Amino acid sequence: MDRILITGVSGFIGSYLAKYLLRDENNLVFGIDDFSSSTMTNLYPLLKNRRFHFLEHNLLNEIPFSVDYIYHLAGNGDFSNYSKNKYNFILNKIDVLKNIINYAILNGSRIIIPTQYCDYQLHKIEYSEYFDCTKLCDDLILNLIEKNKLNCTLARLDSVYGKNMLKDDNRFIPKAINDAFLGKDFMLDFDEDYYFTYVDDVASNLVKLMNNYSKKPTVDIIHNIKSKKSDIIKLIIKCANSSSKVKINSTIVLPSEFKPNFSINYECNTNIMEGILNTVKYFKLMYYS
């Protein structure tokens, strides 16, 4: 039986990945979280499964069991803790990375670390320092991989969305869905395009990447078609049967400067209409029924 660890397991992607992995009866999944940026909500369905074991734990401390595979999802995209204390956030993130990588070395574990590398070109100034920190951590990981010959891959993600997102998740798609259900109008200073990636594709490709060792230090797990924010909002309004309207002040469309290196083995092909419809249905069932 494969022993698999997911850090940040109560988060959006972590909980979805755990659910996906538990479909295989040969998997024993260990989940770790300290709830610094999440809640127990996403864990309730998982705790019913006898092959899932949860530990509330700070990753700066020693992990009291051994595993074959590690998905290090803790702290990925955690803007809230960064804004509270930037200096402590950076030091903590680096110390956790060192600890989890040393743990992987001691156990001989294969490790995958998702990263938001593709978002470094964000045009929102308030996030620029955060992504500078993310790039610093990614560079540290790549140096550790090379120095220690680690069986580790960075999985680059962009704008992941889907079922299991919490109502108070302030990322673009869940916020847009909530606003649509509340009948709020949307005002965009300008339009932007992104590679919005459905969580089903992310989970299946993370597992594929774990089981098929890549010699490349980074692999892109990103939808292969860009979508404008305004088009996503209009689609959400339609799926939610909302009275909301969209106004864009500028005709300028800011393009994504990131160009993914798509691989035939790691493609994300869920149709954006299908993905948005599934996500809107989930929000309606969970929060607006």
Image (cartoon, helix red, strand yellow):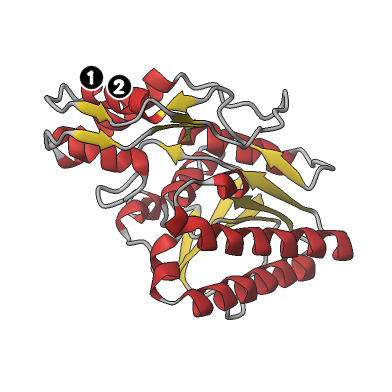
Say which mark, if any, is on residue 94: none
Q: Is residue 74 visible?
A: no
- Disc 1, SS: helix
Q: Tell me residue 11's x, y (percent).
A: 42, 54
Q: Which amino acid does the dot numbered 1 rest on? A: Lys
Q: Is residue 139 left or right of residue 70?
A: right
Q: Is residue 155 left or right of residue 184?
A: right
Position of residue 7 relative to residue 89, above or below, is above
Mark 2 and mark 1 residues within 8 Å of each other at the beta carbon:
yes
State how far apart marks 2 and 1 are (Cα). 5 Å
Residue 11 vs residue 115, the one in the foreground? 115
Q: Which amino acid does the dot numbered 2 rest on? A: Leu
Q: Residue at x 38, y 25 (%)?
A: 251
Pointer 1 residue: 238
Q: Is residue 193 left or right of residue 142?
A: left
Pointer 2 residue: 235
Residue 258 vs residue 75, the one in the foreground? 258
Position of residue 23 relative to residue 125, above or below, is above
Q: Residue at x 67, y 67 (%)?
A: 66
